[in-house]
Amino acid sequence: MLALFILLFLTFFQIGLFGFGGGYAMISMIQGEVVNHYHWMSNGQFTDIVAISQMTPGPIGINSATYVGYTALTNAGHAWYWGVLGSAIATFAVVLPSLILMIIISRFLMAYKHHPIVEHVFSWLRPAVVGLLAAASLCLMTEENFSTPSQCPWQFWISVGLFLFAFVSTTVYKMNPIRVICLCGVAGLLLM
Amino acid sequence: MWELFSNFFRIGLFTIGGGYAMIPLIEAKVVDEKRWLEREELLDLIAVAQSCPGIFAINIGIFIGYKLKGLKGAIVTTLGTALPSFLIILAIALCFQQFRDNIYVERIFRGIRPAVVALIAAPVFKMARMAKISRYNVWIPVIATLLIWMMGVSPIYVILVAGIGGYIYGQVNDGKL
């Protein structure tokens, strides 16, 4: 269990340290480490976290750290109070790099914001972050989240429909994401 | 100090759907009401917080806390911003496990999951415009996507390599290498 705590701390410290580009880019990192690398939870459980993070207040990075910390411990068969400790460790670890870096950077980066080296580094970083976002959504297009045409065509085509609805309503019609999630939840309850 | 904590606690509590949603909240509280920052300072701060790693909302809180009260201020604003989500998610995690296997909850989440994937896909194109992607650098996001999606490379390495690549490219372009 101690090993799991240490791994949680190191993983979320790393995520906090390299989490450029805001919440959604961070989701891709958390997914890479927590689902694909350490198998602390399934892809479906991970998608549930993202859904819950969307519906509850607070930054997604904090929300998912808290949730993953708890779930990783309970999935491994430990009692709920160890899960609470796991939450606290993951959340602390994800903000610690910010606390250290922002204090240093706020002193220096303001002065060197337009330095050519800083601008060059960001000229490749920003496009790469876009790739991170695209990969995050592609990695979640799985059987677990959408089912398959052969396994359950009904669920598959409704999932595709809900995906298109959510995409168009938030991008074209600027609908509030919370409302979109609630509507899709009702659709799921009635149709699937 | 208490004022700093309670204000950022409130900001953390009402930020739904990610960091960008909190900018208008901070603007109203920190600039208009409390006058802790000038509006121009806030704009610079947003640019810095965006280009730094970590959670956007937390980064902004740390910066303001540090500017006003030093290290103690930074810790207080971090706690204030993080605590509401921590407590709420913990409460949900404690209960959710028990009724995740409930058939109705399961159905609701079957509907929600595709929507969440769409919500993550949606900002890709908006971000692409902000990152000034053109036909000269479009290969960067494409390769980053393929590496992560097809090859299972950790995004952390992609970020590191992109930063180093940008630095080297800049040096070569300036004729220093």
Image (spheres, coloured by chain):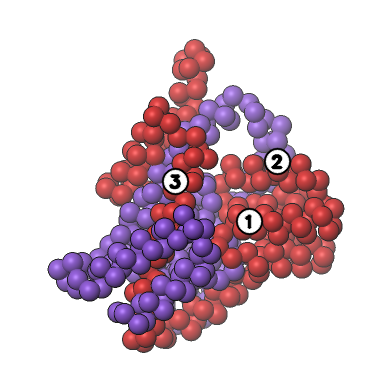
Chain colours: A purple, B red
* Image quadrant where one finds the C terminus of chain A: bottom left
Mark 2: secondary structure: helix
Tell me what residue is drawn at x 57 percent, y 51 percent.
B54
* Label 3, label 1: how far apart the Cα atoms are: 22 Å
Q: Is residue B120 above or below residue B136?
A: below
> Is there any visible trace of residue A1 in the rendered image?
no
Q: Amino acid at mark 1?
A: Ala
Tell me what residue is drawn at x 52 percent, y 58 percent.
A174
Farthest residue, direction top: B175
Percent of width and height locating residue B158: 40, 41
Compare residues A111 and B19 and report the one nearer the observer: B19
Mark 1: secondary structure: helix
Q: Amino acid at mark 2?
A: Asp
- Label 2 vs 3, first from the N-terminus: 2
Residue under pointer 1: B57
Percent of width and height locating residue A18: 50, 47
Q: Do callouts 3 and 1 point to residues on the same chain?
A: yes
Q: Is residue A15 above or below residue B141?
A: below
* Image quadrant where one finds the N terminus of chain A: bottom left
Q: Is residue B73 left or right of residue B171?
A: right
Which chain is disc 1 placed on? Answer: B
Pair 2/3: label in front: 3
Tag on residue B44? 2
Tag on residue B125? 3
Count up the numbered dots. 3
* Label 2, label 3: how far apart the Cα atoms are: 24 Å
Percent of width and height locating residue A54: 51, 66
Percent of width and height locating residue B141: 39, 39
